[in-house]
Image (cartoon, helix red, strand yellow):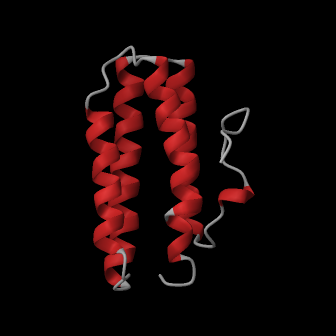
Amino acid sequence: VKVPEPFAWNESFATSYKNIDLEHRTLFNGLFALSEFNTRDQLLACKEVFVMHFRDEQGQMEKANYEHFEEHRGIHEGFLEKMGHWKAPVAQKDIKFGMEWLVNHIPTEDFKYKGKL
C-alpha cells in the first residue's frame, strides 16, 4: 500500500468500527506530527497513542474471542519494540518505516477482523 501524501487517514483505511477508525486517525496524526515536529515530546505523544490504541483494539479482539488475537498482538508488540528504540530526533528512515508499517498493517491485518468484533 502506498503511503498517502499528505500523510493522513482516509476512507480506504476504514474498518467499520467507529472507535477504531478514530484511533487510527490519531496514529496517522501522531506520525505526521512527528515528521513535522521531531521533538522528544512529540515522540512520547506518538508512542502513547500507539500504546493506547493497541490496548483498546486488543481489548475488543479479546472480548470478541477473535481467532487471530495472539498473532495480532504479537505484530503490535513487534512494532512497539522497534518504536521503543527511537530517540528524538527520530531518524527519517524510522518515521518512514512507521508510516509504511501503519498503511500496510491496517489493510492487511486489521481488515481481517472486519465483522468479527
Between 56 and 98, the residue placed more toward the observer is 98
Report the number of numbered marks: 0
In the image, is residue 53 above or below residue 47? Answer: below
Q: Position of residue 105 (x, y in %)?
A: 51, 54
Seen at 48% across and 33% down, the residue is 97
Left or right: 42 in relation to 73: right
Left or right: 6 in relation to 78: right
Between 52 and 92, the residue placed more toward the observer is 92
In the image, is residue 65 above or below residue 58? Answer: below
In the image, is residue 15 above or below residue 83? Answer: below
* Location of residue 79 by image quarter: top left
Q: Position of residue 99 (x, y in %)?
A: 54, 37
Q: Position of residue 9 (x, y in %)?
A: 66, 48
Q: Where is residue 32 in the image (x, y as percent from the top left)?
A: 57, 31
Between 65 and 60, the residue placed more toward the observer is 65
Seen at 41% across and 55% down, the residue is 53
Seen at 42% across and 17% down, the residue is 91
Seen at 35% across and 38% down, the residue is 47
Does residue 12 appear anywhere in the picture? yes
Does residue 30 appear anywhere in the picture? no
In the image, is residue 38 above or below residue 65? Answer: above
